[in-house]
Image: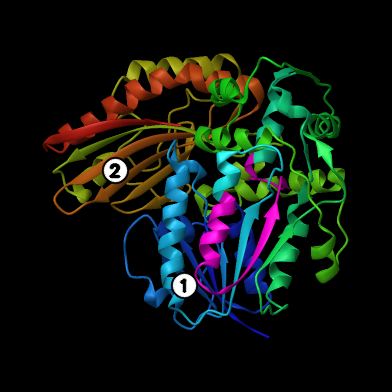
Amino acid sequence: MSKNILVVGASGYIGSHLVPNLLELGHHVRATGRNLKLLEKRGWGHIDNLELVELDLERDQDLTDLFMGIDTVYFLVHGMNHGHDFIEFELDCARRFSHYLALSHVEHVVYLGALQSQTSQSKHLTARKETGNILRDSGKCVTELRAGIIIGPGSAAFEVMQDFVYHLPIMLTPDWVTSRNSPIALRNLLYYLTELIECPQDHNLILDVAGPEQMTYKDQMVRLSKIHGKTIRVIPLKWLSPKMATYWLRFITSVPTNIARALIGGLSCDLPADGSELQRRIPQHLISYEEAIQEALDMSTELVKSEIWGFDPDALLRWQTGYGYYPKQAGYTLKTDASCEALWRQVQLIGGEEGYFFANSLWRVREWMDAMIGGDALQRYRRDPQQLQLGDKIDSWKVISLEKNHFLSLLFGMKAPGLGRLEFTIEDCGDHRTIDIRAWWHPKGFMGLLYWFAMMPAHLFIFRGMTHALVKRCKAKIQEGNIDTK
């Protein structure tokens, strides 16, 4: 039977996979995310039974209308990417949501939490547990699924292990690599989530999600390396604490540092799981760890089959297994009183004989470096010196997305260990405009990370200069600028 479903956190990892599954089953879905534009870039298209809603639970706003006509809620929000205060942020969001949930006619809430340790108090895991308590305070029937590592492309814990295997032949790790967990395939988890709404509940439930076997993190990484045809050696060190490990995570993994840091606390303890009760209620075949890994690798190309990459065939052709799923980024944002139209006119002039607005000599050096290893960056080309169209080649770049007076995305075309793009974003903020120039980079292995960090100083220097040059060319005032790297 078709239901009206609210998915809170639809732009996140699980939500972005769950929504298409619910739509395929014929349900009407109201999907929320903090950034509506990111939701729209998911490539779900204009679907009759899908409604996209911008929702920022950090803001104190009336959520009454959000619950209108809703039967079932999936609560998938977490705050791990929020920074050091993510726990209070997460709990505040849950309290605000629970208040309006209590006033609604919602029948069933499905909350995806985390497995709990019996011996250690991880702040991350404690916050996940407390979020479930807050939702139950609403008086609604809540089914809480507690899961450990999810094996699928984009799963933060899985991607951390992937990056370790790709980047380090020898791993000096904290003792937590001997802790045990019960990894489960993304496909199996999604089946549990979608089938839960067909099992009406009249009381609260807390159910463990477990894969077919309990494994240490060390064993998972060793078996993962074999699938990739690599040999790794994992050496646990008692003196290397999880806190110390967070300092070098940003140099080893492409997973956002805030998320990786939050995960470390949970990884440092055993997370036993008994999935027998959930399996009794919703029986299914639980695929093996190796099968789950292979499915994740087969799905990895989905990243470039999206509006973020403009569904570009060249991007898809160049994507390789081993590229970091999460991108590194560096950018510079400038406030100005220039109009969107004036800024856009200047942005469209990039490349060709015009150059890149600032430090053209550095751009030329990089082009010569590309030519020395067989690239074609020295072949300067533009179809039209004044205007750009989708698919245009600009020297070694390709236009993969553009929106007049707002956005331009260029696919990186030079030879380098990874896949990247350069974006120009213009925003009208009422009393001022912003121009943001940002590079995104999916590194390939350790060399891809080295390349990124080697280029970052030049990126920040050049992007700052480019934004200032664009504003000056508009004969406008510069108000304020800031650097952003992740």
Residue under the image location 39 percent in, 24 percent down: 459
- The foreground one among 218 and 483 is 218
Q: Secondary structure at mark 2?
A: loop
User: In the image, is residue 92 above or below residue 271?
Assistant: below
Q: Position of residue 429 (x, y in %)?
A: 21, 52
Q: Which mark is residue 406?
A: none
- Colouring: rainbow
Residue in the foreground of this view, choosing between 284 and 310: 284
Q: Which label number is shown at residue 101? A: 1
Note whether residue 485 is visible: yes
Q: To which quarter of the image does residue 204 belong?
A: bottom right
What residue is shown at x 39% (from left), y 35% (from top)? 438
Report the span colored magenta: 128-156
Question: Which circle marks residue 386 in the picture?
Answer: 2
> Cα distance, mark 1 to mark 2?
53 Å
Q: Position of residue 29 (x, y in %)?
A: 55, 74
Mark positioned earlier in the residue sequence (1 or 2): 1
Residue at the spot 76% in from the left edge and 58% down from the top edge = 187
